[in-house]
Image (spheres, rainbow, N blue to C red):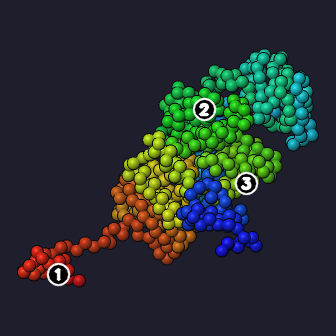
């Protein structure tokens, strides 16, 4: 008999588990084994998960540098605060970092926010056209246009006079040569420099099109990365080390530049390489091996590749990073329309969702939050889109493909920590766990669990706030910094941390009483001892779990030979049932 769903008879294939139009839980339906079957079972009206797994990076803007505004962004779901050194003065960076650290302590690190500094060439942007912030004009191919630094055209640009803001890169005029090509926006508009004046460039419109206000202006890469730009690189690295930031995002990814960064930065600062050129794409395997993470800079890559290639590049890079267990972020024109509007376009929402479905660990908002007038709304939008996309992610199939790809490349890990982490992920899928709790000192066991791509969130229990902040680089990690007392008895101390973390997870609505959870822990104190995985039900508020200390409750009575009565005759012919053991 065919099932009846919403007034329509729909076919069902019991062998494949595909139910066209119905919905079955991803965790409970073990028969669903393909992405197509998973997509057929999606419930469009289902409420998205409360917990977001993908990290959101927000670039600091002038409109939200106060403690109150930063707290609002933190409450809105910001995981990492990005400071663009080409746009933000050092004094502001110091003040904001101090503010973030103070807010974390006031909230008892629940949750904590990491800080990243971006080492990149300073941005140049166009002014606003006559008619307002949303006004657009059409630049006709073959016409001439002046790129002027005259602020009289800041909000009155025309098809003949286009203001460019060079306040962050005043050397622009001296860097450009006649015949250079300058790109605007997505790179589809191309200007060729004809004349160089004192404060203007007269250009031929080689490729025209529609352009709006506040568009990115791209100079030839070799011009903007000249000596006077790279000379600031070492100073910026020293400043990042002085501030004690958690991450550094760098556009300078040659072996020499990466080695320089490593020599200056603290070992506690993770170095992410930005892919912006064809050479960086060709060097992807080396960068994955040397960097702590990868960032796909789509705006810059859009000048190197045709538009139809960018989605393939994104999938190519994310897949390589997922297989190699390296975190990967996506940046560039994600929700750029929200700079001036409170809602994104449907194409932008789909773009963000596809980045999540591709396997990105994080989404970086740049101009949307740094210069946009709706930073909090943008953050909320990304949060909602990510949660919906994660609900549609086919974890079971992806885990199987990930495991196979790592085996083929010899990247499978067989140490105790990695095997325990993988076992925890498989167990969580089999028992429908709501969360995985991992106690860690260095963060390694939590990262091993995250890179196995479980369908449920991972709560990382640690005493080190630095480790907690580094966890924001990985998909699905939610840190809990335990700040309570350290008990003398190690077993009791571990149980106290676990139960405190569970109570916090209840308050944050990550788990509820009665939920099934997987707990990953070591059998001994110290780093690198993770080797145990156990399954529990979350107790109610009046009960606590005995995870480690329960081992001490097992009583092994001493063996007494006098208590065993063995008949003297034919003992060799009698079975074990004739051994008279005391009850």
Q: Quick one: 14 or 84, which is closer to the camera?
A: 14
Determine the image quadrant of residue 173.
top right
User: Is the residue 113 above or below the residue 160 in the image?
Assistant: below
Q: Disc 1 versus disc 3: distance between alpha carbons? A: 73 Å
In the rendered image, the residue lying farthest to the front is: 1
Of the numbered discs 1 and 2, the one sitting upstream in the chain is 2
For marks 2 and 3, the one nearer the N-term is: 2
Element at label 3: helix
Q: Quadrant of the C terminus?
A: bottom left
- Residue 526 in picture, x, y percent from top left: 37, 53
- Tell me the residue that label 3 is attached to: 381
As drawn, is 355 to the left or to the right of 433?
Answer: right
Q: Nearer the viewer, mark 1 or mark 3?
A: 1
| Mark 1 or 3, nearer chain start | 3
Task: Tell me if 570 is positioned left or right of 350 in this view.
Answer: left
Q: Residue at x 85, y 29 (%)?
A: 208
**Front: mark 1 or 2:** 1
Q: Between marks 2 and 3, how big is the CA–CA gap?
A: 30 Å
Is residue 482 depicted above or below 562 in this figure?
Answer: above
Q: Is 389 placed above or below 94 here?
A: below
How far across and how far down the image is residue 386, in percent? 66, 54
Choose top left, top right, bottom left or bottom right for residue 305.
top right
Mark 2 vs mark 3: give the one in front: 2
According to the image, label 2 marks what residue?
281
The disc placed on residue 578 is 1
Vertical order, 9 against 57 (above or below): below
**Residue 300 image-quadrant placement:** top right
Identify the secondary structure beneath mark 2.
Answer: helix
């Amino acid at each position: 008999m065919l099932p009846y769903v919403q007034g329509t008879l729909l076919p069902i294939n019991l062998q494949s588990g595909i139910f066209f139009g119905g919905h079955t839980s991803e965790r409970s339906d073990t028969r669903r084994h393909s992405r197509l079957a998973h997509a057929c079972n999606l419930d469009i009206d289902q409420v998205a998960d409360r917990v977001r797994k993908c990290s959101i990076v927000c670039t600091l803007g002038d409109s939200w540098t106060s403690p109150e505004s930063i707290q609002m962004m933190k409450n809105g779901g910001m995981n990492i605060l990005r400071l663009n050194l080409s746009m933000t003065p050092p004094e502001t960076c110091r003040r904001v970092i101090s503010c973030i650290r103070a807010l974390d302590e006031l909230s008892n690190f629940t949750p904590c926010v990491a800080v990243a500094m971006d080492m990149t060439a300073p941005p140049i942007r166009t002014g606003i056209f006559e008619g307002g912030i949303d006004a657009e004009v059409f630049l006709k191919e073959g016409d001439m246009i002046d790129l002027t630094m005259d602020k009289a055209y800041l909000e009155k640009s025309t098809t003949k006079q286009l203001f460019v803001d060079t306040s962050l890169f005043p050397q622009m005029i001296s860097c450009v040569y006649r015949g250079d090509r300058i790109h605007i926006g997505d790179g589809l508009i191309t200007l060729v420099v004809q004349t160089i004046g004192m404060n203007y460039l007269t250009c031929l419109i080689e490729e025209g099109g529609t352009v709006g206000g506040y568009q990115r202006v791209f100079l030839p890469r070799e011009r903007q990365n000249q000596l006077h730009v790279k000379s600031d690189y070492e100073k910026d690295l020293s400043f990042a080390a002085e501030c004690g930031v958690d991450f550094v995002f760098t556009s300078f990814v040659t072996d020499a530049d990466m080695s320089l960064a490593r020599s200056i930065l603290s070992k506690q600062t993770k170095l992410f390489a930005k892919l912006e050129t064809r050479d960086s794409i060709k060097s992807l395997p080396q960068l994955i091996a040397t960097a702590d993470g990868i960032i796909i800079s789509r705006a810059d890559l859009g000048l190197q590749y045709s538009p139809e290639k960018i989605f393939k590049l994104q999938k190519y890079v994310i897949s390589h990073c997922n297989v190699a267990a390296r975190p990967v972020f996506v940046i560039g024109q994600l929700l750029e329309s929200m700079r001036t509007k409170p809602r994104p376009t449907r194409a932008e929402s789909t773009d963000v969702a596809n980045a999540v479905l591709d396997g990105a660990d994080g989404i970086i908002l740049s101009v949307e939050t740094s210069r946009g007038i709706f930073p909090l709304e943008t953050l909320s939008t990304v949060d909602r889109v990510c949660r919906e996309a994660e609900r549609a992610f086919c974890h079971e199939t992806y885990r199987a493909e990930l495991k196979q790809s790592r085996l083929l490349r010899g990247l499978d890990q067989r140490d105790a920590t990695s095997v325990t982490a993988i076992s925890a992920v498989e167990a969580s899928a089999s028992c429908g766990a709501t969360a995985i709790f991992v106690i860690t000192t260095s963060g390694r066991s939590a990262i091993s669990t995250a890179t196995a791509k479980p369908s449920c969130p991972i709560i990382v229990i640690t005493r080190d706030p630095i480790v907690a902040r580094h966890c924001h680089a990985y998909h699905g990690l939610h840190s809990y910094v335990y700040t309570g007392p350290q008990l003398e008895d190690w077993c009791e101390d571990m149980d106290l941390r676990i139960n405190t973390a569970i109570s916090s997870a209840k308050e944050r609505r990550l788990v509820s009483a009665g939920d099934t959870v997987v707990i990953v822990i070591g059998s001994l104190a110290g780093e690198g001892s993770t080797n145990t995985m156990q399954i529990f039900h979350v107790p109610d508020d009046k009960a606590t779990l005995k995870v480690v200390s329960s081992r001490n409750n097992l009583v092994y009575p001493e063996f007494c030979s006098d208590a065993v009565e063995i008949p003297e005759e034919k003992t060799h012919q009698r079975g074990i049932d004739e051994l008279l053991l005391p009850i």
